[in-house]
Image (tube, coloured by chain):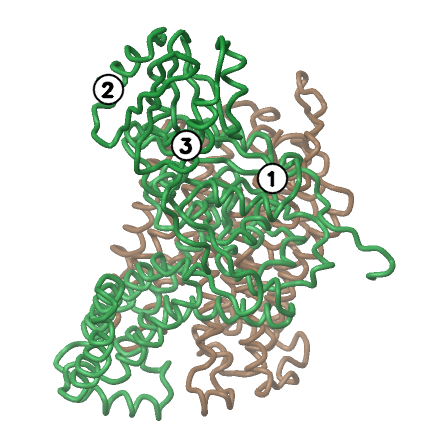
Amino acid sequence: MPLSKKSENTADKLREILNSDDVEYLPLSAANKKATLVFIKDIVDKHGIGEFIIKPLNSLKGSLTGKKLFDTFLSAEKKVVSTIEKTAAEVVGGNTVLLVDGFTYALSFGLKMFEKRAITEPPTSSVIKGPREGFVESLQVNVSLMRRKLKTESLKFININIGNYSNTQLCLCYIDGIADKKLVSSLKERLQNINIDALLDSSYVSKYLGEKKSSIFKQVGNTEKPDILAAKILEGRVAILVDGSPIVLTVPYLLIEDFQSPSDYYNSPYTATFMRVLRLISVLISMLLPAVFVAAELFHLQLIPLSFLLTIVNSIKGIPLSPSYEMFFTLLIFEILNEASLRMPRYVGMVVSIVGALVLGETAVNAGIISAPALMIIAFSGICLYTVPELEQTFSLLRLIFLIIGGSIGGYGIIVALSILLIYLISFENFGTPIFAPFSPIVKEDLKDGIYKGFMLETSSRPKSIKNRNKRRLKVDKMTE
Amino acid sequence: MEYQLKTRQICLFFIAFLPLGKFFMMPSVIAGITGEDCWISVLINILIDFAVFSVLLYVAKKSDANIYTLLSRSLGKTLSKIVLILYVIYFLLKSVLSIYEQKEYVESTIYLNAQNVFYFLPFFIAAFFLCVKKLRILGRAADVFFLITLIGYVLLIALSINNLDLASVLPIGANGFTNIIKGSYKSINWFGDAVYFAFFIGEFKFGKKDRIKLSLSYVISCIMTLLFILVFYSVFTYISFRQRYALTETSKYTTVINNLERFDYFGISCILLSNVIGAALPVFFCSKILCKLIDIKRKWITILVLIGIETILITVFSEYYKSIEDFILNYAGYYYIFMSVILPCCAPLLIIKKDKNAVEIKPKKEKKNAVYQS
């Protein structure tokens, strides 16, 4: 619907559409003409309104033309809107709209001022060496962080609005000339097809991007750090930044990504390789140790060294539960404590630690409800899981599945389940990329940044596991050789 | 034309899966017939297999299509279907014995205290899960599983090395030529692996040095088998035939075991992990042929029926295992020879008649970073 020439009429229509008390309609005059300024009072920069809109408006004299009106304002972000619907969208989007008598269009000024969190180190990926800044909930701040990292005209952002009620802005970020064009266009198409009431977090988007809807494995990568995101899009990935979420999504995703820590790239490659091997072993231990222990206790005593077997026998003497139930309940207690410690207020966190570690743990062992080895194994398995925090939820579920299999079918069940898991992982693809690459299919060049971390100068080409263009990323001259 | 496999994956497939089935019962069966000459019986089978493999390699180089197209093009629809049905029976027989063997091994060795048929059932779920996947996934599996196989194999051989008495395999030919041939004949079920390669024809791009690469990897897989037999016999000498499951027995006398208990079980577990796919290979190829023969939209139903038949055969009729084993080892040998040696040797005839309408296939130049194709 076009705007009326009378600003009051347009303001009335906006009142009808918006019908909310936090919308302010400020009557003004511009060169003897009536004008109305429309904005949502809690999300605009009021000082900016006074300085960049009202002050220049009052200085207007003589006849008023469209060009004169447009040029009067010094705001860097201004645009013309010519329908009621778009004007209303501008207002709810946080912009300030100026309606002036005699004009069938309005001027919209980007003078938003939301409360936002300061840039801090993200809790999920802290480093000893390397940049500490992390993304925040503001899309603009996140975009600025990326612009600061990659000062190139090839860095592109595509804005898309999603959410019938939230109208959340999200942003596709990629490097033109490196990212695969087909990937960008297919991603854009998929995002535009999302029909949802509200997009409250980037994790909502990731559910739409996964090709296997029922999979327990991640299908979209994520990061909270601009340096990691910069590195990822330089490898040919495409990022999705969502307004209101500090977590940025990246596609395509490879499983190995989660075994790579940001500090690996700032430390010596020897340390990085050692750490990655350690993470892999830890994840395997956390997933399999409770299951293998229970299976050994129930079915394969020949696996346990004699002296250790005697210790176990002594410790389980008088325990009323069978090994599998005992381990299952210990795991259940661990998961409950884990969940409670995340949810409860911090000031009672200490109480939970004491109750969990001392009362539940030690007392349960002393009372002969659970054995010390079972408690130790679950505790160790739990700690191991957090060496790769990104996969904590997935492997926590797998640990439970393997424990049930180990307790009911035994060692061969674990072996078969492991082979099924491997077959599943090697056949898993998202956006045409196998998530188990570079190990299956083997991509020789990419193995230099797999579990083994090669020297930076060895990785002169971009990963081949991901579809990308412009293969070379660094040149090694004779001096550096 | 989109290739499902890469040459590297076929090479790793030979190493990862082919030797595994021969580590369980075969060594003791042959040792019972030929004694210290058991390795010669194995060598004869290996040489026959290699000759068949060489013939198929020649066909793969000259061929412009996969085995199904080659068969229907040369033999016509009816005859090609008959050949495929014969292969379905061949793989079914082969799978019955290999899965039986796996089941017996698992029940009597892994579960010392509590044997139950229920413990082996998950294998059929894994087999079904593998069979519904495309050939491409088998190639990818080889990429990962070859490392697991090698870790297990090297560990078991390394743990056995202290107890070797290589002189025990001498003198060569002590048991007589007849016994050696008899040993070869009775162990034919565990060989004939070259046939698998026939189903890879046309599914990979035959490059310049691929003949050497493929032959070399096939030879490596043969050496792995031969070395295992030699180590096994050298450890147990004249009582080898009593050690029914070589895999568990070979390294059990190592001194490491005194300190760490059955540390060799780590290696055994690695071999068992790879052998979940290894033992399911005949069913996998059987299912692929059946899916070609029975043209229905939901191919998983065909596979489910096949796996169901296998499950019933192996669990319900497990009491008759010995009779089935005896029948296969004594009487099915000629059928095995026909299917795994004679018929594959006729494969060059398939490439004589080329499709009149066939245009020379020039595959699209593969993008180097497009790994998703394999």
Viewer-nearest of discs 2 and 1: 2
* SS under mark 1: loop
Q: Is residue A158 left or right of residue B57?
A: left
Q: Which residue in the protein does label 3 denote? A: A49
Q: Nearer the viewer, mark 3 or mark 1?
A: 3
Lateral position of residue A33 relative to residue B340, left or right: left
- The vertical placement of B223 against B54, above or below, is below
Q: Quadrant of residue B74?
A: top right
Task: In the rendered view, tell whether residue A100 sits above or below residue B343.
Answer: above
Would you call the spot at circle 2 few (<14 residues within 10 Å), some (14-19), or many (20 or more)?
A: some
Display colour for chain A: green
Q: Position of residue A47 (x, y in %)?
A: 41, 38
Q: Earlier in the sequence, mark 2 or mark 3?
A: 2
Q: Residue at x 46, y 74 (%)?
A: B266
The residue identified by callout 1 is: A467
Q: Residue at x 46, y 61 (%)?
A: A125
Q: Is residue A373 left or right of residue A90?
A: left
| Residue drawn at the location 52% of the way across and 59% of the way down | B145
Q: Position of residue A184 (x, y in %)?
A: 54, 32
Q: CA distance from mark 3 to mark 1?
A: 47 Å
Describe the element under mark 3 as helix, strand or loop: helix
Of marks 2 and 1, which one's residue comes earlier in the chain? 2
Identify the residue under disc 2: A15
Going by the numbered disc 1, the residue's amino acid type is Lys
Foreground tag (2 vs 3): 3
Q: Are marks 2 and 1 in contact (CB under 8 Å)?
A: no
What is the letter of the brown chain? B
